[in-house]
Image: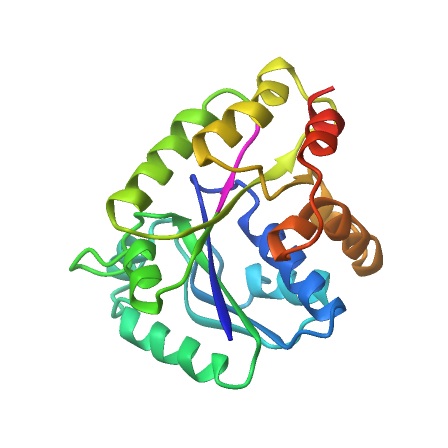
Amino acid sequence: MSVIIVTGTGTEVGKTVVTAALAALAADRGTTVAVVKPAQTGVRADELGDVDLVRDLSGVGDVHELVRYGDPLAPVSAARRAGRPTLDLATVADTVHTLRADRRLVLVEGAGGLLVRYDEAGATVADLARMLKAPVLVVTTAGLGSLNATALTLEAMAHRGLDLAGVVIGSWPATPDLAARSNITDLELLAARPLAGAVPAGAGLLDPQRFLDVARASLEPALGGAFDAAAFRARHAA
């Protein structure tokens, strides 16, 4: 039973859409899959959040959100402002262990980046990955700034002995500029492996069937599908 941690090089890089795409692909293959969002911030209790988007896009109903804070801040800061307890990562780990007992795949989408704090003691997504002994899928952007942010994330992972599941571009532009096109080769050099995919910008607005088609075309490598690195570069770097 596998667990994959999905993190980003920052906020708004497409983590939720990538998580939904992985869930959709797994379910389409007949894999029992659950999704866990330990903490959602910037969304009120009466608003739709990331778990709702994952459920709607992927068709997977086994989706779990543990805490939600209204302020668009890091979980520890949002909890502090709300006067509520912070999230205990041991609780998250227990939830994942329970789910993985009878699911073949559990996807855990972190808040923000790898080192975003969940509690006052400084527990992070990296700590959760270490607790679960789970590989980390890094979602990054396309364009200027992506290389430095990705390099810092990968360096932090290596320093902590975390395994890399792959690097994905979470929002590939319809008309990529020179910086975005050059990212394909440069990100592969940073990760020392081919990219695990690039999800087109706007994929989160598609209906579930079209979204599944996009997931198949964009992220099959991330779930062990056949991968032609040369064809991938030619398709995205042209």
Taking the magenta stretch, the answer to whether it contains residue 47 is: no
Q: Nearer the viewer, residue 32 or 189?
A: 189
Image side of residue 182 versus residue 59, left or right: left
Q: Main secondary structure of the magenta part?
A: strand
Q: Nearer the viewer, residue 198 or 49?
A: 198
Task: Looking at this view, name the residue that lies furthest to the top.
Answer: 178
Label total for image? 0
Whole-percent x, y for residue 36 in the image? 49, 69
Q: Quadrant of the C terminus?
A: top right
Residue 48 visible? The answer is: yes
Whole-percent x, y for residue 149 in the image? 40, 31
* Magenta stretch bounds: 138-142
Whole-percent x, y for residue 110 in the image? 42, 56
Q: On screen, 3 above or below 156?
A: below
Residue at image coords 84%, 59%: 209
Image side of residue 155 versus residue 9, left or right: left
Taking the magenta stretch, the answer to whether it contains residue 141 is: yes
Q: How is the image coloured?
A: rainbow
Image side of residue 27 versus residue 117, left or right: right
Task: Looking at this view, name the residue that lies furthest to the left.
Answer: 121
Q: On screen, 74 above or below 58?
A: above
In terms of image quadrants, where is residue 237?
A: top right
Residue 72 visible? The answer is: no
Image side of residue 112 versus residue 80, left or right: right
Whole-percent x, y for residue 20 in the image? 64, 59
